[in-house]
Image: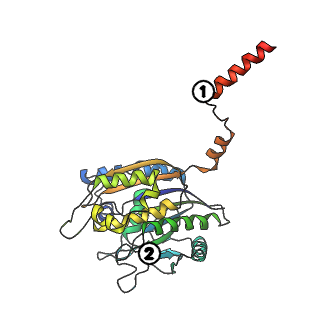
Amino acid sequence: MARIVAGIGSSHVPAIGAALDNGKTEEPYWKRIFSGFEKSQAWMRETKPDVAIIVYNDHASAFSVEMIPTFALGCAAEFPPADEGWGPRPVPVVQGHPALASHIAQSVILDEFDLTICNKMEVDHGMTVPMNLLFGKVEKSGQWPCPVIPLAVNVVMYPPPTGHRCYMLGRAIRKAVESYPEDLKVVIFGTGGLSHQISGPRAGLINSKWDTNFLDNLSKNPQKLIKIPHIDYMREAGAEGIEMVMWLIMRGALDDKVDEVYRFYTVPASNTAVGHIILANRGRGGAARKSRAKPKRSSGKLKRAAARARVDRLRG
């Protein structure tokens, strides 16, 4: 069966894509950011996923205020890069996985999550920037390392989905993936954020304490995060900080207990906090090893056992 092996959280700042596309990655301002993803790219090359599910938000490229799906799943065979006003990014067309995507759609909808199914959709920096950060730079004439299933979430127009709804959708996606018969290794991305606000009186807001606490709980206590109301994201993380609920879809698709493989955080990148984390499922192997291990006996039980042994020897 297919299985989700890890979850990845990553900011999707558009200026990061522009820096990559325009050859500025070695400039001091940008080098510190790209250097923070070098270990992640090495991990991705070693992991070699067969498919990536990428949760992101569209920035008026595929959708507009005329049509706003809360959750939209890409089931097409390919997804061209969108023109966001200065031409499409010079990256390859994203290849989809229609068979797995359609299976996820059927399973999740029958689990009572109402998805919009997209059989034609362009994708913007919200998806391609995290792909570059984790897969590295890929020439337009090349090909991304694996097929991708896009899941677009509305976090632009009110009301966005709650953190709890996102987390439970992640649970449903996990169930869907695990019921797919083909043996596939899947990773799931949650993108966007972290704290930032790009306009208004609080433009430039970054709350590093909030971001660090969010990353800590994402690893160890996601149940605390799913209770956060929208207003707290707005107040503490800025108007665009609501994008962080998309990370909870990724977290919901993982085991309750995960291993934090890597974390990177820096500020700023174009007035945005850049956050990144890799969480790996522990798998059945670790659980099996634990079950085979002999249970530890308390010091009291050991003392009582030793006393009984002495009595037995005296009787003998």
Residue annotated with mark 1: 299
Q: Which residue appears at 29% of the width and 53% of the height? A: 208
Would residue 240 be visible to someone looking at this image? yes
Residue annotated with mark 2: 80
Q: Which residue appears at 40% of the width and 49% of the height? A: 263
Badge 1: residue crowd in 10 Å (few <14, some 14–19, many ≥20)? few
Labelled pair 1, 2 in contact (Cβ < 8 Å)? no
Q: Distance between the residues labelled 1 and 2?
A: 64 Å
Q: Which residue lies furthest to the left in this view?
A: 201
Badge 2: residue crowd in 10 Å (few <14, some 14–19, many ≥20)? some
- Quadrant of the rendering where the N terminus is positioned: bottom right
Relative placement, left or right, of 150 versus 231 is right
Point out residue 48 in the picture as x, y percentages from the top left corner.
54, 55
At label 2, the amino acid type is Pro
Would residue 141 be visible to someone looking at this image? no
Point out residue 295 in the picture as x, y percentages from the top left corner.
65, 35
